[in-house]
Amino acid sequence: MNSLPYPVARLANAVKRYGQTQALAGVDLEVHRGEVLALLGPNGAGKTTAISLLVGLQQADTGSASLFDSAPNALAARRRIGAMLQATSLPETLTVGELIDLFRNYYARPRTVADVVALAGIDDLLDCRYAKLSGGQQRRAQFALAICGRAELLFLDEPTTGLDIDARETMWSAIRQLVAEGCAVVLTTHYLEEAEALADRVVVLAQGRIVAQGTVAEIRARVASRRIRCVTTLADAAIALWPEVRSVARDGGRVEIVTDAAEMVVRQLLFEDAQLSELEVRRAGLAEAFVEITKEAA
Amino acid sequence: MNATLAASSASDPASFHAWRAYALEAKYEFLRVLRTPAFAIPSLLFPPLFYLLFGVLLNRGNSAAAHYLFATYSVFGVMAPGLFGFGVAVAIERERGWLALKRVAPMPPGAYLVAKMLMAMAFALIIYAMLATMAATLGGVRLDIAQWFALGLIATFGVLPFCALGLLVGSRANAAASPAIVNFIYLPMAFLSGLWMPLSMLPQFIRDVAVFWPPYHLAQLALAAIGREHAGGAFGHLGFLAIFTIVCFAIARRWLARTA
């Protein structure tokens, strides 16, 4: 990765404002060949703006964006990317097959139709007009357009929104296959399990700034807290008084305790309640880490 | 487009590729429109119907009126694919993100607009062919081959100023409002340019401002092409239409560049 002269996409101190709103307040970002980078953040954090700058739909007010070391709107750079943007609808009266035909034609060495169909999981949709597709099928058709040019870099802005679990798994495995072929992916998502499943690296944005970045494990490790779940006769209020305990909640018959010192709390629990059962200790997931990080940033 | 063509020689595979891209883009634009009844029906049906009603049925035997109305209804007919094909379609595609996706995709430069222009010209030619068939069979219009041909040429290329005007609307208007806005331009402009009845039958103040409307100039060219009474010289009309087209395109491109 380091042997390459330049990253496949880069934002350098990019600033973008819309009227009074600061969408990006100086963001530095590099995407390397073959990696999956997940951009996370609450709504309005600047994820879509970052993508808009990288694909050349918008210009940074100050700072710069580049694709393959050239301007993002250069034709040569665009030939090497594919994109699935948010809130896109394709022409309703064309069929999926016609749309793929149109987009394949933009590239010098497109993927075969059979290949696109298999990857995007749209076998039975080729002859359907876009308007007749369900929301999830439309998303898959958009994915098909994004991948039909053998892109070296894919931008996927909330790709699996509206997909059912099967369709999401299909798309994840397609993304993994593309990454195995050497394609880099920039992904935004609201589903943290998606970032957890796919991403090599996570960048968390809040209010137009990067507030955390690292591997999924590194981001998770930023949050020291763990969750303890068990069935116990001890009262919640009593547990809440222990100094190491951050919070106590009850979920059905179980108590859920959040703590930074799980071992000490477990020892205390077993000491005070010999009948305690169904003990479970879990490290915080990306979801918890994310909540924590964005709360700190706010 | 010219720059792209000039830059690539015939042996260059990229030039073949670009040509194919333009052709496919135009083909799918035409298919898309043909399958959109809200566009295809009014623009393919209304001009022949209006012409049948006002130019044929209500005009029994008056040869001068028949020729005048054939020329002006041809102009009326070709305004629609330009205004609606650009005004409404661009507004919708802009709002729904299709335009953004195509900008990100490596579409050859200008292919989006060129395809729409070719589509509008094809529609204009079809509309003209329908009107010409009715004019020759029912309307009592007698022209020589060169005149039929010249008027067809004017109809086909005369759609371009309306493409530009439509693009201007489409690059700003929201999708829901765009059909109303286009109609609000289309119908009054047709009337004020003397397409439905000769300007000489309209009040003086309407005649005074007619030179400001593009359909007026196209109608004068159409009347000249079939050897009927017209005002002004061909170069003046062509000049007005060319400048109008370029200015509208230039403004619209600036506006479009600013929308994401």
Image (spheres, coloured by chain):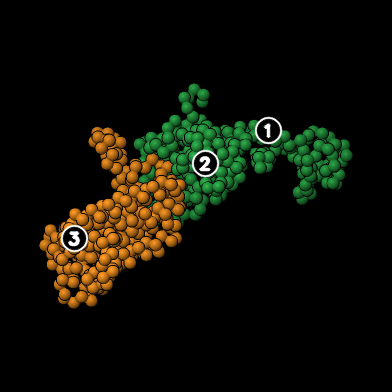
- Where's residue A136, x and y in %? 51, 51
Residue at coordinates 61% horizontally, 45% vertically from top-left?
Answer: A42
Q: Measure the alpha-carbon separation of dots 2 and 3.
A: 52 Å
Subunit of label 2: A
- Where's residue A75, x and y in %? 38, 37
Instruction: Tell me the tag on residue A221.
Output: 1
Select label 1 or label 2 by which is in front.
Answer: 2
> Dot 3 corresponds to which residue?
B232
Instruction: Tell me the tag on residue A233.
Output: none
Residue at coordinates 20% horizontally, 62% vertically from top-left?
Answer: B220
Report whether residue A235 is seen: yes
Image quadrant containing the C terminus of chain A: top right
Hey, which quadrant is residue A28 in on the image? top right
Q: Say few, some or many: other residues with alpha carbon within 10 Å of mark 1 (under 14 / 14 to 19 / 20 or more).
A: some
Hey, which quadrant is residue B8 in on the image? top left
Q: Say few, some or many: other residues with alpha carbon within 10 Å of mark 3 (under 14 / 14 to 19 / 20 or more).
A: few
The answer to whether tags 1 and 2 share a subunit is yes
> Dot 2 corresponds to which residue?
A16
**Reading the chain from its start, which is encountered first: label 1 or label 2?**
2
Which residue is the extreme one toward the left?
Answer: B144
Say whether residue A281 is left or right of residue A237: left
Which chain is tinted orange? B
Q: Measure the alpha-carbon separation of dots 1 and 2.
A: 31 Å
- Where's residue A215, x and y in %? 61, 32
Task: Assign a secondary structure to mark 1.
Answer: helix
Q: Colour of chain A?
A: green
Select label 3 or label 1 by which is in front.
Answer: 3
